[in-house]
Image (cartoon, rainbow, N blue to C red):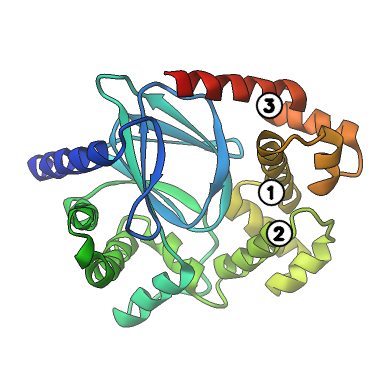
Amino acid sequence: MFEQLYRQRIELTKIIEGLTGQDGTYNTDIPSLFFSRYSNDTGPHYGVYKPSLCIIVQGRKEVLLSQERFRYGPADYLVASVNLPITGQVTEASCEVPYLALKLEFTTSEILEVLREFQMGVDKKENAKRGMYVSKIEPSLLDAVTRLARLLDTPKDIKVLAPLIRKEIIYRVLHGEHGGMLKQIAIEGSSTHQISDVIEHIMNNYEKSFKIEELAEIANLSVSSLHRHFKEITAMSPIQFQKQLRLQEARSLLLSESADAADVAFRVGYESPSQFSREYSRMFGLPPKEDIKHLREQNAQRIKA
């Protein structure tokens, strides 16, 4: 098994290296498949993980979900079953052995299609579980992922074969050690599916204030059940979840536009610029103006390199 995994990793390494000449994240010709390459350990990266499978072939990474850490490397894979605001950091990389990884995003409908087609049962009453997990990778899963990446060498085959291999990959993940967590997201009536509706609502309306009773109504849960299940899945409360989305969007706006911090604060839903500045500093380590200046200097250095 170890020899088979080694061969598969070597092939994936060559594919990713061949399509990522410089550090960064790259789209591929296969929808929802992304490659990443970094030649050094990185500082914290903030973003939202969509439902996805993440595999590292070289290096190591740490993902922070609220205060919970998920560490993984070439022997593992990470799955996010719902949209989750995270902090990621490459912890092992060098010019000689760069960090190389891939991410394959999928949808709830794709998961449900696999469950129905292969008649994979799931218990609607099963308790909600964390929406992110790390498992040991198996040759069958890595083989399917390698075959998907290999299609990039034959673009004419992607339209026909990629959907079939994507389906196999989801099937393999569902049969994995923690596959039950992924099953729950697609089953209407399960607590995970109910919370995913709330997550979708918050993501689409992050700049608006809400009452917890409104979210409970969306989920068809009591307020106490909503709080309990939401925190079990996301490791944070609905308000904390919204705050992370607001601050991440604010940082993105400040970096991409010549906008005033107070104006951006109002745009993402803050009524008080001073509160925005305090919470921004708490999350990113610097006040908005200093943080954006630091980020732009880093980007300029990276481009020169």
Q: Are marks 1 and 2 in contact (CB under 8 Å)?
A: yes
- SS class of the residue under badge 3? helix
Q: Residue sitting at 78 percent across and 36 percent down? A: 259
**What is the secondary structure assignment of the residue under circle 2?**
helix
Q: Quadrant of the C terminus?
A: top left
Residue sitting at 21 percent across and 38 percent down? 13
What element does badge 1 sit on?
Answer: helix
Q: Which mark is residue 202?
A: 2
Residue at the spot 29% in from the left edge and 67% down from the top edge: 171
User: What residue appears at the point 30 percent right and 26 percent down from the top-left corner?
Assistant: 98
- Above or below, comparing residue 221 to residue 32 in the picture: below
Which of the two discs, 3 and 2, labels the residue nearer the N terminus? 2
- Nearer the observer, disc 1 or disc 3? 3
Amino acid on which disc 1 is placed: Phe
Does residue 30 appear to the left or right of 133 in the view shown? left
* Residue matched to label 1: 241
**What kind of residue is marked 2?**
Ile
**Amino acid at circle 3:** Ile
Q: Residues within 10 Å of mark 3 (few under 14, many from 20)?
A: some
| Label annotation for residue 292 | 3
Q: Is residue 285 visible?
A: no
Q: Is residue 167 above or below residue 264?
A: below
Q: Which residue is farthest left?
A: 3
Of callouts 1 and 2, the N-terminal one:
2
Residue at mark 3 to residue at mark 2: CA–CA distance: 26 Å
